[in-house]
Structures are given as C-alpha cells and as structure tokens.
Image (cartoon, rainbow, N blue to C red):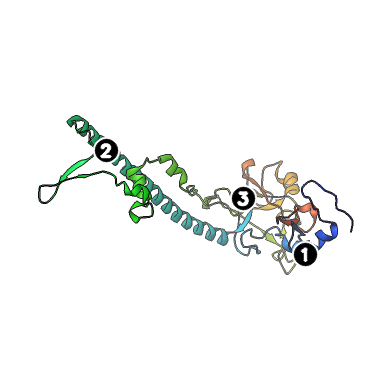
Amino acid sequence: MTRKSKQPGGHNPLTYAETKRLKSSGYGTQSTRLTSQSMLPFGHCCLSLSQIEGDAVATPSGHIYSRETIVQYLLTKNRELKEQKAEYERMRLQVENKRAEWEETQQKKAQQQFRSKDQGAMSNALVLKGDDGGEEKEAKTENSLSHVSYWLSSSQPNAATATTSGGDFDYQKEIMALPSPPPERPPSPMSGEPLKLKQLIPIHLVHEQDEGISNNGERVLCSVSHKRITTQDAVAIKSSGQVMLKSVFDELAKPSMICPVTGKKFKDKDVISLVKGKSGFAASGNVEAKKYNPTLT
C-alpha cells in the first residue's frame, strides 16, 4: 500500500476509491441531478404543486398560485400569527409586571431607609421580648446558617423573589430575552415577503385543452401567439390579467401600451414579470440538489 501524503485539511486524506465507497453510505456531501419530473412547470400552483383548475392569481413577486390554495394559506397563517401575538403580549406583560413590582419594592425600601435615618434608628437588629417578659432575644435579619448550609430547602435561590424583591432588575436584559415579535403580515410561501389578500392579482391562463390542441391540458399558452410557455420569460398585465411571452409583449403590447387581447390601456407599473418554469436542462436554472454531511478529513 502506498504512503498517503499530507494535504491541507486532513492528516489522512481518503483516496478516490475510498471516497466513492463511503459515498453510498451517506459520507460527505451528497449531490444529485434533478430531472424534469422534479421541476415545477409554468402555470402550476407554487403551493399545491399541481395544475391550476380554478381561478389563478399572481403575487407581486411573480409566483403563480391557485386562489383557493393561497387564500386558505393566508387564513391559516393569520390565525397562527394572532395566537403568536397573544402569547408574545402575555410574556411582555409578565416582564412589565415584574418591573412594576421591583420599582414598588425599591420605593418602599427607600422610604423605610429615610424614616429610619430620620428617627436615628441605625441598627439592623430588633429586640424582642419573650412571653414571660423576663428574657430578651435578639433576632437578626439574616440567618448565618443559610450561608453554609446550602443544601437546605430554605437556602435554595428563588428566581422570582430574587428578581423582583431582592436583587437588581435588568429591564433591558429581560426584554432581550423575549423571543422576537411575530410579523404583522404572513410571509409569501416562495419569496418570504409580507403578503396581503388584496395584493393577489387575478390572471387568465390559457391551457392547451381549452384551445383543443392537446387533451392533457397541462401546458400554458401565450394569450396572443398561442405558443407554449415552458422556460421562456413571461409577463402578466394587471388591468387585463392576460399572460403572454416577453418577446410578444415587447413587440405588440409595449409600443402602444394597449393589451392586444382586451384592448385596455395599461401602465409600466401594471406589468409583472412572472417566474419562469424549469426543466431538466441546465439552461433553465439550477438542476442539482446538494445535502451537506460532515466529514472526518
């Protein structure tokens, strides 16, 4: 067996045969090539990953969804955010109550110290008389046994009393310890940006089945040229809801700023660039998936 030379990153690097043998058992970073069946075709819902049979809508980010699916998603997320906000407010109220108790305790302590100083009582010990009236006992404020007998239940620390009554209360530290507040709006499933229900833009998708070209009806056609939209750039017009190829839009619609299908006028802000579909070819985008696993070398 030949001697392995030292390389940066490990004292005992693996050979190609050893690395290939360990790859099958999940060692190291795993990568695989995605096929066309793993890609989402253009015109399919980005949430349900199925063909849109009912009303289709688009978000400002250019992703296409089924109206029923995205509305159900927004309702569910709004309900979850409402519960998270209530829980956050409850935790915030607990911190505010602790702060109020601590401030009240500090105020009472300051008043008591002022009275003691004003009356000339500087001692911290209290003189108590017994029941028979003959013997006097001195009660100390702190039990000296608690300093050494830490295993006793009476000597165990109490976080609530130490924070509110005994020790110092750090309001900023308590606030920083709270989880981050929930967002005001639910995020978009794909882009992660805040999404409102009124931001959904209705669009009209023309399928092959509607035009009698094919029976499966999965492919979406350009509303003007009736060409298949697969991995090409496509746009949608807000005012009319028509979906067309970017090249057709630049040639027929953009010069006159009038929709070729409905004849409605539109502005530049009404044009939305839709997310392109992907295929198994590398030209359509990233077609490789990777999973990182730690290695020993």
Q: Amino acid at mark 3?
A: Ser
The residues tagged by marks 1 and 3 sit, at their Cα atoms, a distance apart of 35 Å
The nearer-to-camera label among 1 and 3 is 1
Q: Are marks 2 and 3 in contact (CB under 8 Å)?
A: no
Q: Amino acid at mark 1?
A: Ser
Secondary element under disc 2, as helix, strand or loop, is: helix
Q: Residue 36 sits in which quadrant?
A: bottom right
- Residue 219 visible: no
Pointer 2: residues within 10 angstroms few (<14), some, or many (20+)? few
Q: Amino acid at mark 2?
A: Lys
The residue that label 1 is drawn on is 24
Q: Residue at point 29% right, 45% down?
A: 142
Image quadrant occupied by the N terminus: bottom right
Pointer 1: residues within 10 angstroms few (<14), some, or many (20+)? few
The residue that label 2 is drawn on is 109
Which sits in the foreground, 266 or 31? 31
| Residue 70 coordinates in the image, percent (x, y) | 56, 58
The residue that label 3 is drawn on is 191
Q: Residue 98 sits in which quadrant?
A: top left
| Residue 59 coordinates in the image, percent (x, y) | 60, 51
**Residue reaching furthest bottom?**
215
The nearer-to-camera label among 1 and 2 is 2
